[in-house]
Image (tube, helix red, strand yellow):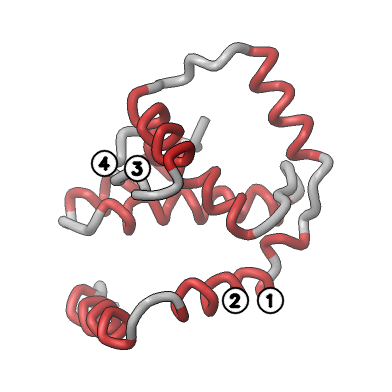
Amino acid sequence: MPEQQTIERAREDAREGKSPSAQAGEFVREEIHHVREGKHGARSPQQAIAIGLSKARRAGVKLKAPKRPAALKRKAQQDAKAGERAGRKRSRGVRNALKRESRASTSRQALSRQAKTSAAKRSGRARSAAASKAARTRKAA
C-alpha cells in the first residue's frame, strides 16, 4: 500500500495538469526510497520501477499499459482494475522474496545506467522534445 503522502503528491501533480507518467513518478520515487532504506530489495532498477508503476495503477493513476510483451500488458491492465485483491499469503510471499534481493539495484550508478540505456532507445528528437517540455512546465522555484 502506498504511503498517504505519496498519494497526495500524485494528486497534486494531477491537479497541476501533469502527465500520468509524472504522477506515477511519485510512486516510483517512493519505491526506490523503500529499497534504499532497506524495507526490501529489488533484482534490478527496472524491477523497482515496475513495482512503483504497478502501485500507481492500483492507486488510480491513468497510466497506459505497455504495447509489448502481452503478459506485461495484461498485468498492467489487471493492476489498473484491481484494488488490493491478492490474498495475504501471496502478498507475504512476494514481500519475503523481495527482502532477499539486493539493495544495490537502486544505487545512483544503477539508476544512472538505467536512465542512460532508456534514453538511448529514444530518438534525439523525442529526447529534445521532452527536455523542452520539461523546461516549459518546470515549477517556478
Please tell me in which quadrant of the rendered image residue 13 appears.
bottom left
For disc 1, the marked residue is 109
Is label 3 in a helix, a strand or a loop? helix
For disc 3, the marked residue is 8
Give the amino acid type for the residue marked by disc 1 in the picture.
Gln
Image spot of residue 110 (x, y percent): 67, 70
Residue reaching furthest to the right: 100
* Sequence-first disc among 3 and 1: 3
Question: CB of mark 3 within 8 Å of CB of mark 2?
Answer: no
Task: Check the picture and name the quadrant holding the C terminus.
Answer: bottom left
The span from disc 4 to disc 2 (Cα, nearest Å) is 26 Å
Front of the two marks 3 and 1: 1
Image spot of residue 26 (x, y percent): 42, 53
For disc 2, the marked residue is 112
Asked if residue 25 is positioned above or below residue 71 in the image, the reply reads below
Whether residue 80 sits left or right of residue 17 in the image: it is right
Please tell me in which quadrant of the rendered image residue 22 appears.
bottom left
For disc 4, the marked residue is 62
The span from disc 3 to disc 1 (Cα, nearest Å) is 29 Å
> Dot 4: within a 10 Å radius of its alpha carbon, few (fewer than 14), some, or many (20 or more) residues?
some
Question: CB of mark 4 within 8 Å of CB of mark 3?
Answer: no
Question: CB of mark 4 within 8 Å of CB of mark 2?
Answer: no
**Which residue lies at the image location 66% right of the left edge and 18% below the top edge?**
90
The span from disc 4 to disc 3 (Cα, nearest Å) is 15 Å
Question: CB of mark 2 within 8 Å of CB of mark 1?
Answer: yes
The span from disc 1 to disc 4 (Cα, nearest Å) is 30 Å
Front of the two marks 3 and 2: 2
Give the amino acid type for the residue marked by disc 3 in the picture.
Glu
